[in-house]
Image (cartoon, helix red, strand yellow):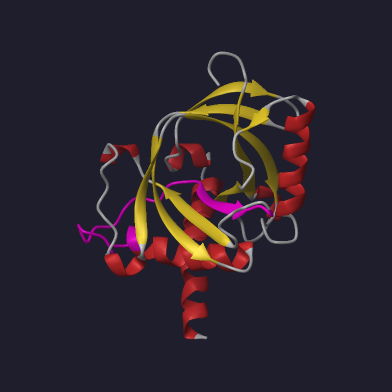
Amino acid sequence: REAVMETAMMHFLYYLFLAVCWCSGNILQAIELPNYTLILSQSDFQIRLYNESTWVSARVSGTSFDQSYRNGFQRLYQYIHGANSNSSKIAFTAPALTSVPSSSSPSGNTYIVRIFISTRFHGKPPLPNPELKLWIEKWKSRCIAVRKFSGYANDDNINKEIEALVTTLNKQSITIQDTTSYIIANYNASSHNTTQRLNEVWINISGIGTQC
């Protein structure tokens, strides 16, 4: 019970910070996000070309999205609050990503929760303490199809949002590069208005012009 309360408090503090940034202006001005170029924008999805980026990642053998996110985020929270080789606090960023395995995933119920690392580290952030079982992950530039949705991302709605984006991409004849897992991106929170919460589905794609 104490561990659950501690995790809940970590989430509250993290999202309180994001909510304050949101209410004080544009969250994009307050928190660093990975850089991208907008390639295509439609009413229900976008195609973005993301630059190279660095993430700290937690692998979780979970039974659900909600449970896996809580488990992974708790470890990542400890990392950015000093459980690292520099014993230093690391600036909040957005989004937090959760890779959700599909029914065709060879890894079973393995989820991966990630937090973006600020570009000021130039791809060399402090290493996580070993007991957290985290690793630093470097992504090459990639094209990602994105579908936005509001409210709370949870086990009740993420599959519907994923399926909606997959259906759209298939209709557009856009190639999905990996069907073994999909990503849910969480940005900000407001405890008073769920419509201000921003979530996205991310799917790696190719076949869009010369850039993707």
The quadrant of the picture occupied by the C terminus is: top right
Q: Is residue 102 magenta?
A: yes
Q: Residue at x 67, y 24 (%)?
A: 41
List x then y, in percent, for residue 55: 40, 46
Specify start and end residues of the magenta stretch as a single range.
Answer: 79-103
Task: Kindly report the secondary structure that dominates the magenta region of the rendered protein.
Answer: loop
Which quadrant of the figure has residue 208?
A: top right
Q: Is residue 192 visible?
A: yes
2 w.r.t. 33: above or below? below
Q: Is residue 92 magenta?
A: yes
In the shown orientation, is residue 73 left or right of residue 66? left
Q: Is residue 44 visible?
A: no
In the shown orientation, is residue 49 left or right of residue 54? right
List x then y, in percent, for residue 188: 56, 50
Q: Residue at x 66, y 51 (%)?
A: 104
153 w.r.t. 177: above or below? below
The one nearer the camera, 122 or 60, is 60
List x then y, in percent, for residue 109: 59, 63
The one nearer the camera, 188 or 193, is 188
Q: Residue at x 35, y 42 (%)?
A: 118
Total labels drawn? 0
128 w.r.t. 45: above or below? below
